[in-house]
Structures are given as C-alpha cells and as structure tokens.
Amino acid sequence: MAGAVRVLVTRPEPGASHTARRLEELGFLPIVLPLSETVAIGTETLSGQYDAVAITSVNAVRHADPAMIERLAYLPAYAVGHKTAGAAKSAGFAEVTAAGGDGEALATKLSSVLRPGAHVLYLAGRVRRPDFETKARAAGLELTVCETYDTAAIGHRDIGPRLGDVSIDVALIYSAFAAKALVDLVERREIADNSVNFWNKTRFLCLSSRISESLPEQWKARALISERPDEQSLLNLLASL
C-alpha cells in the first residue's frame, strides 16, 4: 500500500496531531478525528506513607496536580513503558524505571523490587483495564488508586465534512473505547446510509486483540493487531501493508 493512502487517526489530542505529522512524513494522508478526550479530575489531598509510585499512562502524569507530583517526586516511580517514564521524569520524578509495556509487566516489576505489603500509590485514569491492579494485589502489594483523569467521547457534529467523500483506507484504533466510539459515529442516522460503501475496504489497525474484539463482525475480518501495544509498532504495521 503506497501513495496518498487516507489514514484515520482516532487517538486524543495532542497525540493525534503528532501522529498526523508522522504520517505526512511517511507519505500518508492523515484524517484527524479524535474520538475521545482526556479531562483532569480534581484529586483530594493524599495522606499516608508510600514506598513507590506506579504510572500506567502519560495522561495520568499530565493531568495530575503539580503540587501533588512535587510532594511525591522523592519516591521511586515505576512506569508502564519508556514513553510514560519520560513523562514522569519531565514532571519531576528523579528515579524512574520503565517496565515492559503493559500493566502485567509493571506489576511483575514492582513485585520483584518491593516486599509484600509495600504501599504503592497508583496514578491512573478512571477508565482503565484491571490487569495491573489485579496482579499487583495478588503479589501482596497494597495499592492506593489516585484517579487523575477521565476519558470522554467526542460527538463530532461535523463528522461528514471531516471524513470527506473518499473512503478511508486505514483506521488506527488505539483503545476499545475508541473502537466503540467509531461504531457509534458510523451508525448515526445522518451518515448511516453511506457508511457501508465508505468503510467496506477499510483496514483497521489495532493496538491489541482486545481492541479488535470490540469491532463489529464485518470489520474484524479486516482488522490487524500490532506486534506491541505502542504507536511505533502500529506505524510499522501500516508501512507493511
């Protein structure tokens, strides 16, 4: 697949614009349509003694109260992957360790360096998978969850003009939330009559098998899963088509 391939970018801003620039550099034509947005949640003043901080997304740091981060910065921080680790360092954490890229790997890393009963503050989003918490608690770690942001769907009243009249060649799907939001948009009355032909050749590139399972049956046959749950793997998959 080459040339002016139309690629739908569904991730939230500011990441969507960053991805669009990367796609343009690679010779693709990005169609930016964020399907969700992250919003900060006001957090109460935290009390208690912690042995470490766990972070499973960049947004958990980005939306955290800076004063809270300043109070926690002396603690060792453990991030789900290198990108999140970079965000933690930029926020002020002095000692940051990156795990293997998913929640279970992060829990494994924490349980290998902390004693059972250690108290971990978990910076997280309100919408999240349970993998990290389940495995960390099973390993005997005590978790305090601090939700710093929520995920909200974007309705896009102007979806027709944003998508244009030419069908989408590839859609990049970053979460099960985005997969459901895209289906909801496509099924809206004002575009439903044109949606069958518009999407009948679209390839859906997903960050995980869980995301692909969230797609409707007629789309699953054209869904591919990246080797790892990160954007570079997703773009590598795109380049291989």
Image (spheres, rainbow, N blue to C red):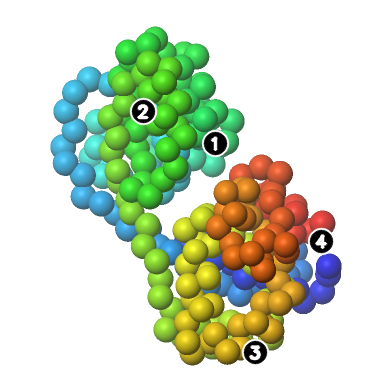
Secondary structure under badge 1? loop
Residue drawn at (53%, 62%) of the image? 179
Q: How many marks?
A: 4
Q: Which mark is residue 53?
A: 2
Residues at marks 4 and 1 touching, judged by CB atoms closer than 8 Å: no
- In the picture of the structure, the residue carrying the numbered disc 4 is 241
Q: Circle 1: is it few (<14), some (14-19), or many (20+) Cα within 10 Å?
A: some
Three-letter amino acid code of the residue under disc 3: Asp
In terms of sequence position, does the residue under pointer 3 or pointer 2 come before the other?
Answer: 2
In terms of sequence position, does the residue under pointer 1 or pointer 3 come before the other?
Answer: 1
Judge left or right: residue 64 versus residue 13: left
Residue drawn at (45%, 26%) of the image? 135
| Quadrant containing the N terminus in the rendered view | bottom right
Q: CA distance from mark 4 to mark 1?
A: 26 Å
Q: CA distance from mark 4 to mark 2?
A: 40 Å
215 vs 239, nearest the viewer: 215
Judge left or right: residue 63 versus residue 82: left
Figure check: 236 above or below 8: above
